[in-house]
Image: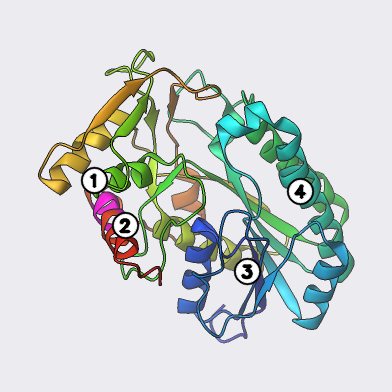
Amino acid sequence: MTGSPKPTVLVTGGGGYIGSHAVLALRDAGWPVVVLDDESNSTGVLVPQGVPYIKGSIADRPLVAGLLREHGIGAIMHFAGSMLVAESVTDPLKYYRNNTLASHALLEEMIAAGVPHIVFSSTAAIYGAPERLPIEEGDPKLPINPYGASKWMTEQMLADAARVHDFNYAALRYFNVAGADPDLRAGQIGKTSTHIVKIATEAALAKRPHVDVFGTDYPTPDGSCVRDYIHVSDLAAAHVAALEQLIADPDENLVLNCGYGTGLSVIEVLDALDVVCQRKVPRAIGSRRPGDPPQLVASNRALVETLDWTPAHADIHQIISDALAWERKLKNGKPV
């Protein structure tokens, strides 16, 4: 992108946790940004001043068509959607509506407006309970919950549509996202959260009485779920790098796992929290949650080899320290 003007990027769900960090990363790199968010799990408070912010749904086709036209949108980063695994099991139609059908509406308007690039927020949940680790992008897609299934269906839509329409896409499959902007410009303030680092840092500051550990009878070394934790700012940087790659090669589509390639159990994360806090944060052992696979660890070989991206925050203690600093800021009544 050196020497050429950067197109305006529409960030759907840009008021949420990951989307707001992507907005910061784009702005830091000099990209013009417009945010569309329905505030179903955000308030818009994290969107920087000066960024056009529109409250609305990606399923509102007239609204989206107008935004794409009026702002001259040249690329989309698509984060909007529902994301709670357990809720997807009890209310599956909500997830197919908010994730799959709404993405279909957005995609149709994008194609009609001639927007040439889209970066899609996908998930490791599409792999289900994998038989081998680390997970490669070509491994079987066998989601075990409607959240993962709804995201996998959207990936399939993107792949099929890109074969016959003039756009390219990146599908970034997140593993467990955690932490906060190191400069504390953004962090997680969603109305609901199942993220262990978020919950644990709240417990560390007595915002909740303890941390729930959902299951210690999984086939893992200490019995708790194992996940690949990636700092949200590193993930945001990967989105910018993916968009740059799409623009550099309009004939290329990207499907990339986003993680560090290292698995940590829930117990190990809580032990790291205790180290950062220099005290034991209370824990409560409970039963398994529905839809949780025992282990999800990424192979990030393709990510590192394909994009101009190197992680800057790949340490669980830093991830926890940044998240804890953000929680302290929230506790002091300063969300921005």
Q: What residue sits 31% from the left and 54% below the top?
A: 323
Q: Is residue 290 above or below residue 209?
A: above
Q: Which residues are magenta?
A: 318-323
Sooner in the amino-acid sequence: mark 1 or mark 2: 1
Mark 2–mark 3 Cα distance, whole angstroms, equals: 38 Å
In the depicted view, which residue is nearer to us: 11 or 259?
A: 11
Mark 4–mark 2 Cα distance, whole angstroms, equals: 36 Å
Please state if 162 lies on the left or on the right of 119 as rendered: right
Label 1 with label 2: CB-CB less than 8 Å: yes
In the depicted view, which residue is nearer to us: 224 or 152?
A: 224
Q: Which residue is mark 3?
A: 248
In front: label 4 or label 1: 1
Element carrying mark 4: helix
In front: label 4 or label 2: 2
User: Residue reaching furthest left?
Assistant: 278
Amino acid type, label 2: Glu
Which dot marks residue 158? 4
Percent coordinates x, y for residue 11 in the rendering:
63, 66
Element carrying mark 2: helix
Q: Which residue is mark 2?
A: 327
Label 3 with label 4: CB-CB less than 8 Å: no
Q: Is residue 175 above or below residue 322?
A: above
In front: label 3 or label 4: 4
Label 4 with label 1: CB-CB less than 8 Å: no
> Please, which colouring scheme is shown?
rainbow
Q: What residue sits 65% from the left and 27% below the top?
A: 90
Q: Which residue is mark 1?
A: 204
Percent coordinates x, y for residue 126 in the rendering:
61, 33
Amino acid type, label 1: Ala
Mark 1–mark 2 Cα distance, whole angstroms, equals: 9 Å
Amino acid type, label 3: Ala
